[in-house]
Image: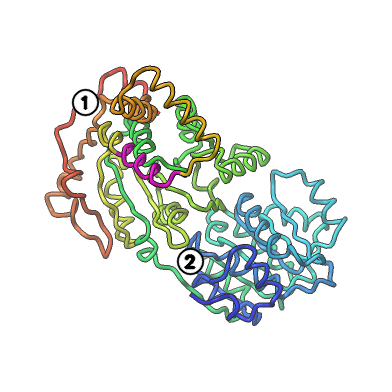
Amino acid sequence: MSKFNELNISAETLATLDRMGFSEATPIQTKAIPALLDGRDIIGQAQTGTGKTIAFAIPAVENISPELGDPQVLVLCPTRELVVQVANEFEKLTETKRDVEVLAIYGGQNISIQLKALKRNKKQIIIGTPGRIMDHQRRGTLNLDYLTTLILDEADQMIDMGFHEDIETILSKTPEDRQTVMFSATMNKKLMALMEEFQKNPEHISVMDSQEQSRQIKQLYYEIQSRDKTEALKRLIAFYNFESALIFCNTKIKVDELTEVLLENNYTAAALHGDLDQKKRDKVMAAFRKGAIKFLIATDVAARGIDVDDLSAVINYDFPRFGEDYVHRIGRTGRAGREGLALSFIGRNELEHMRKTARMKKLKLTEAKIPGINDIQRQVLHTIKNDISSVKLQEHDEKLVSQFLELCQEMNLFEDQIFALILKYLSESKINNLNSKIQFEKPKSSHRERKHHRSGGGGNNKFGGGGFKKTGKHHKRKPILKSGGGHKKKHRH
């Protein structure tokens, strides 16, 4: 990686980056920043979590003329969440630049607030969704005559969401000599045609490598029946003891159902989908980032723009319909050189789709077994061991320990009884809401899948550099017991 001080960035911005905790540039930042500082148009291909926001924000801020009050930079984003996230990064970068103002414009927020903000102060940097930007253009409340830089962030998603014509309209009403920047994870014909029309000899910068990205993300899949997904999720939560996890469902209805089930089982969880108003979405995201909510259940569209540091895992409660969505999902874990974890539930009719995703994206997913109660108890002991070795008692902790030991002496408890009591309490807190009767039978293969397997198309085969492998002794198939009828109804979520 390059150092930011090697990229011709001003001393003021370098100091700001240092306060933000950045010293080394990521590959996309190393390649994109010099080109953007030179005023060139670029097409940047990079996944979520590669630092692309900083890659285009630094040059945009560096090239601002503070004495001019009109908008000079416009960033278009597909969702409100991404608008807010990008605006926050710009706010941090311009913290010491008193004459530079940033404004986020998006649907779901009272437009009168935005109208007052546009009239009251100079706003050189505008970040918004296409629909709301067009609304202001029609009203004559957003003047883009002096725009120097226009940035399309996650352009492929904007096209997929139907913003193609909106983007064309916005671009056509901006100065022709502007710098046009596009960042996208994927490329398609509509996007290429758009860039061919509105960009000037763009430089193509790519740091895309799904295979490289996947090496730092442990990817496991569990072939189970749909009715057992909820119990499987609860066991994985108990086994891995997640600090935070992003759980994906394919529909808003399923998001709400799963959130309700987790809340009923005393997990701190919240739903995120398109039916939530902006105020509630902002509240949910703030709580998730602070750790007040451990589990965020979301749809793909609603999760656009979610950027949370130290995310323990991504869980595909429903496997995504499109391969690109899978890559986007798992890219939210395993950042900054840390190992990530992606867990997926796979139904009978999804195996071939998963294999195709692996082939196309050159990914490796390993089949695993849902942990049993004994596995979870052993993991609890392992966690306790690690916690004890790193614990540092504070004054109030020492008093509590002293009181506990006095109580044990009064009860004439032996050391082994004390340890057994502690372990029993800690392990039961993990497994008291789990159903020990379920051992997760696999979905029965269809005739087509059995034929495919006999022809050598399943299991341990590799697909174009990606594929699936089964884990060793611990994950061998065993005779399965079917769950009782009462459970079947209870866990249909």
Hey, which residue is sitting farthest left in the picture? 454
Give the percent coordinates (x, y) of residue 168: 65, 64
| Image side of residue 85 versus residue 51, left or right | right
Report crowding for label 1: few under 14, some 14 to 19, many 20 or more residues within 10 A (C-alpha): few
Q: Is residue 402 left or right of residue 483?
A: right
Give left or right: position of 426 versus 174.
left
Which residue is at 37% across, 56% downward? Answer: 217
Q: Residue at x 37, y 21 (%)?
A: 490
- Which class describes the residues within 10 Å of circle 2: few (<14), some (14-19), or many (20+)? few
Please tell me the numbered disc located at residue 424: none
Residue 269 locus on image (x, y percent):
51, 34
Q: Is residue 388 magenta?
A: yes
Residue nearest the viewer, comparing 360 with 466: 466
**Type of the residue with mark 2:** Met
At label 1, the amino acid type is Lys
Secondary structure under badge 2?
loop
Above or below 174: residue 120? above
**Majority secondary structure of magenta residues:** helix
Residue under label 2: 187
The image quadrant where one finds the C terminus is top left
The quarter of the picture where residue 6 lies is bottom right
Q: Residue furthest right?
A: 120
Q: Is residue 397 visible?
A: yes
Question: Label 1, on which residue?
Answer: 482
The residues colored magenta run 379-391
